[in-house]
Structures are given as C-alpha cells and as structure tokens.
Image (tube, coloured by chain):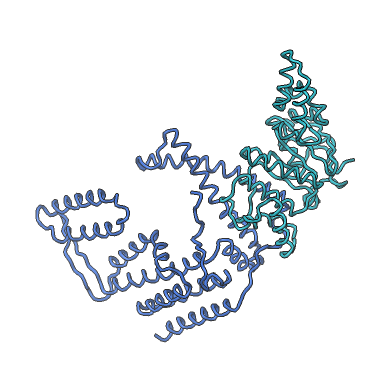
Amino acid sequence: MKNIIIGQYIPGSGFLYKLDPRTKIISVIVLMVAVFLLKSIVQLSIAMGLAILILIAGKISIIRIFRGLKPIFVLLIFTFVFQIFFNKEGALWVDETMTIGFVSITSMVLWTIIWRMLAKFKKFKMILFILYIGGLYLIMKYITYGTIFTTWQFLVYEKGVEMSFFVVIRLLIIITLSTVLTLTTKPTDLTQGIEKLMRPLKVIGISSEDFALIISISLRYIPTILDEANKIMLAQASRGADFAEGKLKDKIKQIISLLVPMFIIAFKRSEDLADAMESRNFVPGRERTRIHDLKLGRLDLLTGLATVLLLAGSILVRIYL
Amino acid sequence: MGYLDIEHLYFQYSSKRMILKDINLSINQGEWIAILGHNGSGKSTLAKLIVGLLQPKEGRITVDGVDLLPENVYDIRKKIGIVFQNPDNQFVGVTVRDDIAFGMENLQVSKDDMLKKIDFYATKVGMQNFLDKEPSQLSGGQKQRIAIAGILAMQTDIIIFDEATSMLDPGSRAELMEYIKELHQEGLTIIMITHDIEEALYADKLVILKSGEIYQQGDIPTLLKHPEWFKEAYLELPTAIQIYYDLKQAGHDNQELEEYLWAFSSSK
C-alpha cells in the first residue's frame, strides 16, 4: 500500500512533460469540445488518429493508455450494447428469432456455472466474459427444442451499429486525452495549474488558493489514510474478521467496521493538521508566496495554437460537412 | 522579566474542569526548559496556549515584551515554532521541499530566498538528499527532522517540542535529541514538553506539572534530590537515580558508584 501512485503520473521526457499544466488543462478541455462537435464516424476516426499521433509525439506508450482504460471497459461495453439494442433507425441488419424454453434455460444456467468456475483465471476475465455473452446468444438462437416458453426478436439496425461505434470511439478519445493529462503532469503541478486557472473566480468569492490547498492536502494524505486502513484491516483480521470472503451482507458490515475507525482517526488527524498549519502561520485567505512558479514558454504557445486550429477545424467540419 | 513570560494563566475547555491553574513561568532567551507531566497534566494544552492555538481564560502570556493576543498572534508565531507529537499529522507538503517551504510561504518569503533557505536548513537536519521525496517514503524520525527544518527556516527564537520524540524508535529519538542539543548550543530557546524524565534531563531547568498546576520547578540536580516529588506527580525517576536511591535504601554505601550514577544522569 505504501507504494501507491496517486494520479497516474509517470515520469518521462516527451514534449508533453515540458508543457505548462495550464496549457495542458485548457488544451484538453478545448479538444474535448472539438471532439463533441464531430458528427460522423469518419471524422471521429481521424480525430482518434490525431490523438494517437499526440501519444506518439509525446513518447507515451499506447499500451499504458490501454491499461488505463481497463476500469471503464464495463462502461464502454454497456454503452455499446445499449446503443445496439435501443437504436432502431436505418436499415435492418440482423433479425434473429431467440427462443427461451426449458432446455435453453437449463443450458444457460449450466453455461453460467461453467463461466463462474472459470472466473479464477483472472487474466482471461475479459475473453471469458465475451465468450459467455456469445454462448448465451448461441444458446438462445439454436436451442429451440423442448418446451418453449417464449420467443423474442433480436434486431440490430444500421444506425444502432454506427451509433454504438460512434459513442465508444468518442469516449475512447476523451479518456485518452484526459489520461494523457494525468499521465504527464505531476499532481502538484496539476493542482497548481487548476489554482492559477481558477484565480478569476475570486470575483464570486471562491478562493482558488484554498481550493488548491485542499486538493494538495487530500493528495498528500491519501497514502497515509490507505496505510491506516491497512493497519485497521490487519488488526481486525487478527481478531477474526474476513474481508475477502463472505456474503455481500457480511462484506458491507465489515466495510462499516473499517470506515468508522477510519473516520474517527481522520477527524483527529485533521485537527492536528489544522493546529500544525496554524502554528506555522497559515491564515486562510492571506497572501502567500509560492515556491512553485509556472512559466509559459514557446512550446506552450505552439500547443495553444495547434489546439485552436484543431478546434477551428472541427467547427468548420461541423458547419460545412 | 524573561523572554517568554506566563503570568497567572488559567485555562478550561467550555464547562469542564480547569485544565491549567495559575501557571507562572519565565523563560529566558537561550534557555532549555523541560515541562514534565503525567498524561492529562495539561502540558500539551500549555504548549498550545503559548503558540496561540488556544486562548487563556485568565492571565497573560508575553513574548519579547508583547502580549499574546488574537490580533498579534501572526507576529508572535514568527518568534515561536512548535513540533508536534505525530510526525504524519504535521506534514503539510506533498514533498519534503514543499513542506519546508510551507511556513515561509505563509510569511511571504520570496521564492529565491525560500530555495536558498530550504537547501540550507535541509542540509542542517541532514535531509538535503530527500527534497523530492514524499512523506510516505520517509521514516517518523525523518519527518520530525523536516518539521524542525520547516520551523528553523521560519527563523523563530523559540522551538517547542510537544512530545516530539514519543512516536519515534529509540535510534531516531536519540538522533533527534542530539539535533535539539545542537540547536540549543547555537542559541535557540528550547521548550520541551515530555513525560519522559530521561529526555527532560537534557534541559537546564525542569518544570513539573501535576493536574494542571506547577508542582515543582528548578534546576534538575536540586529536584532529583527529592524523589518523593516525582512519585507524587505520577512520574518516574531516571533509571540511574532510581538505582541510586534503591541502593541507598538497601543500606549499600558505595561512594564511587553513587557519584557515578549522579554523573551519568547529569552528563546529558
């Protein structure tokens, strides 16, 4: 737990690392807007190609980005399936009659049991899941004998397939862009960039410095608190608690028994920290000098220019194509 | 009049019993004073009052002739720094450099000045090679040294150590005590809050707190002549002195050993 990496920052040397965090934050936001302006798969594919070009130019391994996508794979699949099922525009591409009967339900249950038994091969989780879904499809399509309870039509339309690819590619581009940001920017720099960008909010009474301090202290204390959680878990495990197994109900109970002491300790900690900060003359809202300074360079200018051009390009595409 | 004066100080949290009663204390510049007390004797509360984290119910604290009031606490804190017990709960920065800088940032020290001072004081506490490390990569003793560097960089006249060694392993503890000794030799005023008599032996002067009152104060050899005072304040004697009294009680009379045991305790 001690070596946990906050954010996904990985030291490197590409041009993306040399950019001012402000440039990167603004560029990412602008490029996201640009991506949302695009209307067709072809345009999006070109945008995807450009995103990959940025990765190559910034010497970032594509595999790493792909690994970063893992946690949201479920979301991507869900989006994809949702679009396929519910978008009923355009030409009809697939029209299959699916059967649900005694034999097919039994087969599906058996198939599910086999799938669950294979779940211990965590490495192939994704492939197994796809095989499982494919298996369910085949069962419902071909096992038509025995008592049949009901049938339904599996319909896929042209627009549905197009939209599902469209949405998924768009999501991929957006996630790639934001991953590039967090991958090449230290959390401290990121916070500082946000702080500087939020400066104008002072007009409506939001202090960007306090906000940045809150973020940086949170970042600072995540490893400490995880360490604490680990200790509490060990202490509870040594008295017979089992965090790995048990029913969902038991698990929830155990998580509560972990959260309560964690919160109590965190509150105590925050009191101590407030004292420590105050005794070192911290006064919220008071002017402070900063040890980190951000400076915009020529590279930032070029990046900004390129970003603006890309945005202009996608606006033109939106209007004329 | 000392550099830091506490006169008739009373403190209580809302509607509870009085935590501190009629505290009178005068600390001179360059002095090392140990405030010794059992758990709940009010010693940490006293430390918080001195740095203005709490407001006294009655009485006054003056630093360098200036009354400590909420209006001028910012200026008083330029003169007094405090190192707390838990190394993790006072590390504000994301890295060592950021943490040493924190106090100076609050004092609006310029960036160039800050960088110079960070290098200087990090070297002073032997942490110059750790400037980019994160707190999770440091030991408790190292974190306490960073806390000290952060206060030194603020150039205070007094440093309060509020049980600053109690969460450290014996090795780091001895190391930290040596650092504090060096700082004292350089003229810094040290206030050491502790329940550990062995640590208190380093000081020039000892104040024993008992249930929120100053029970005894004076120089260490004088106080050690009265073992009953320590017992009554729920404190232990230094091991060597305890052995001395045990031997004496058992009727042994070895002048040489006695002298050795006394010298051993005052060698710090």
Task: Label the cyan chain with its letter.
Answer: B
Where the C terminus of chain B falls, by quadrant?
Answer: top right
Query: Do we see residue B73 in this rendering?
Result: no
Q: Residue at x 13, y 57 (%)?
A: A143
Looking at the picture, does residue A48 appear above or below residue A255?
A: below
Looking at the picture, does residue B228 appear above or below residue B101?
A: above
Q: Residue at x 31, y 74 (%)?
A: A162
Check the image and name the residue furthest to the top. Answer: B251
The answer to whether residue A219 is left or right of residue A242 is right
x%, y% of residue B56?
Answer: 78, 39
x%, y% of residue A42?
Answer: 35, 79
Looking at the picture, does residue A302 appear above or below residue B181?
A: below
x%, y% of residue A286?
Answer: 72, 59
Task: Label the blue chain with its letter.
Answer: A
x%, y% of residue A247?
Answer: 34, 41
Q: Residue at x 71, y 26 (%)?
A: B240
Tell me which corner region of the image, top left, top right, bottom left or bottom right, holds residue B217: top right
The answer to whether residue B67 is left or right of residue B36 is right
State the residue in front, B178 or A43. B178
Tell me which corner region of the image, top left, top right, bottom left or bottom right, holds residue A284: bottom right
Callout count: 0
Q: Residue at x 61, y 76 (%)?
A: A297
Where the N terminus of chain B falls, by quadrant?
Answer: top right
Check the image and name the residue furthest to the right. Answer: B1
